[in-house]
Image (tube, rainbow, N blue to C red):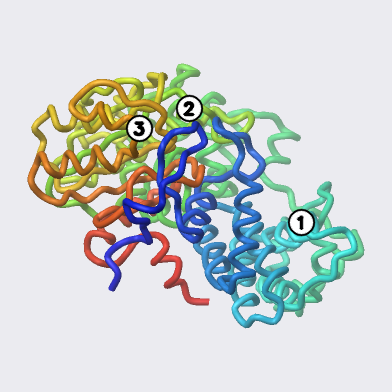
Amino acid sequence: MSSLNRSVRHAGAATINRSGHPAYAMDDKTKLVIMALTSMLAEPKFYGDTASDLLMLAQDLCRAGEGAFVAKLAVWARTKGNIRSVSHVLMAVVAHECTGQAFVRPAVRVVASRRGDDGTELLATYHALFGESVRWPHALQRGVRDALEGMSAFQIAKYQSRGREFTLRDTLRIAHPVPRDAEAARAMRRCVEGTLAVPKGWESELSARGNTAEVWNELIVEHRLGYMALLRNLRNIVASGADYDPVLKVLSDAGNVRRARQLPFRYYSAWRELSAAGLMTTSIARALDQALAASCESAGSLPGRTAVLVDTSGSMGFPLSIGSKVTCRDVAAVLCALLTRMCDDAWVCRFDTSASALTLLGTSVLADIRSVPASGGGTNMIAGFDRLMQSGFDADRVVVLSDCEVNMAFGGRTSGMRTRTVQNALDAYRAHVGHDVWCHALDLQGYGTQQFAGPKVNVMAGWSEQVLRFVALAEHGFGGLVNAIEAVRL
C-alpha cells in the first residue's frame, strides 16, 4: 500500500504562493481535494477566492478521464467532510462532463440523499452553472430520482424550498420519482399542484408565540428540535429561562455527536456566544467540552511525541464566510486542541511573525482552545521550526495547522532559508534530531500550493475532525486524503 499522499519532489516543482513567496506546486488531484475541503463557495478569502479555480480544475480532471475521482470527492466531501455546497458543484460538473459514465448515477444518488433538499440544490447548481436552456443529463435525473423515492410525506412537505428560485416542485417535474407509498404519492402530487402545506416547525412556533421559556420548554419536551437546531439555538434557549438540562444531555451524548456530524468549531461558537452574553455556566461548558471531546474519538490516538505548530498570523483572522464570526484561526485552535487530546505527548507552538511555545493540557478541549492566542502579524512558519529546535523536543512527527501562505522568515538557525520553502527547515530539524520525522501539513484555506514535499510528508485539508484520522493512517501505510478518496466505492 502507498504510505503517502501524492507529494511532489523537492526538485522540479518550485512555484510561488499567492503572497509571492516560494512554495511547491500541487498535483491536480491533491489541489482539488485541498480546495474542495476548505471552501465555502463564492466567499472571500484573505488572499482571494478560489471558487473559479476549483470549478476549472474539476472540469479539467473530468476531461482528462478522472471524472470518477471528482465524483468520489463529491461523495467524500458530503458524507465525511460535512461540506454541502462544494459537493453539489463537483457533482454538477461530473454530470455535465461525464455523460454516459456508469459512476455518475450512484454518486448523484449519495450526494442527493443526505438531506431532503440536496436533490433540489444539486439541480439548482447544475442549472446555474450550465445555462437556462439546459438539457438535463440522464444520470443526474435518475440519481436525483433515486434519492427522491426514499422521501417520506413529511420530508416532501418540509423540504419544498418555497421562496427559492428552484423548488422541490421543479425537481419532481424533472426527476419523475416513484413515491415509496401512498402517503408520499399524495404529498408529491400536492407539492406539484402547489397545495401542499408546509408542516409547522419550531421556527414557525417561535415566530407565532414568541421566544419564551414556555415555548422552548414545550419544543424540548416534545423533541421537536434536531441536534443542529439545539446547538445553534443554545444561547436563545438559555436566555429565555427555559430548562436547558435536557438539551445539555442531548448535546453531550457521544452517540448523538457522531450522528450529528457537526463541524467541531460549531461547539466552540456556541460556547463563545453564551460567554459573550454572560450566560455561561459550568454545566453548559462541561457539556460542550464533552461534545468536543466525543467529536474526535473516531480520529484515534497518536502514540509517541508530537510537535504541533499552529498559525496565528493576520491572514488566519479572516472569517470563513461573510457575516460569520468564525475565523480560520478559530478552526485552527479547535483542531489544535482536539489534536493535543489525541496525543500521548505533545509540544505546541504558535507562530506568526515570531513564535512561542504554548501550554495545552489535553484535558479540557475548550480550555486548550482558549490557550491559542489571536496574535496577528506575518506568516513565518520557519520561526516555529526554530522554536522547536531550541526547545530540545525530539518529535516523532510535526503537525502544522496553517493557511500555508508563508510570507516571511526572520531569525533563528534556519533564517538563511527565507528564499526557500519551509521544507528546508523541516530537513534541518530532521538533521538536528537525527531521524526522519513525519510532517503532516493541514491546509485550512486551500490556496493551491504547499510548503512541504517528499518522503514522510502528508498534505491534508479540511475543517472536520475526520481529517485528523489521516495523521495516523498515513504513518501506518494507508495513505492520505487522496488515497482515501480514491478508495470510495460508487
Q: Which mark is residue 419?
A: 3
Q: Is residue 308 above or below residue 8?
A: above
Q: Secondary structure at mark 2?
A: helix
Residue at image position (48%, 76%) is 489
Q: Look at label 2 and name its amino acid.
A: Ser
Which is more toward the observer, 329 or 323?
329
Q: Is residue 407 above or below residue 438?
A: above
Farthest residue, direction front: 12
- Residue 145: image quadrant is bottom right
Label 3 or label 1, whichever comes before in sequence order = 1
Q: Is residue 245 visible?
A: no
What is the CA distance from the residue labelled 2 to the residue labelled 3?
Answer: 21 Å
Q: Look at label 3 and name its amino acid.
A: Thr
Residue at image position (67%, 74%) is 98
Q: Is residue 152 left or right of residue 294?
A: right
Q: Look at label 1 and name its amino acid.
A: Leu
Q: Position of residue 259 (x, y in %)?
A: 45, 57
Residue matched to label 1: 129
Mark 3 crowd level (few <14, some 14–19, many ≥20, 10 Å Cα): few
Q: Position of residue 88 (x, y in %)?
A: 65, 58
What is the CA distance from the residue labelled 1 to the residue labelled 2?
Answer: 30 Å
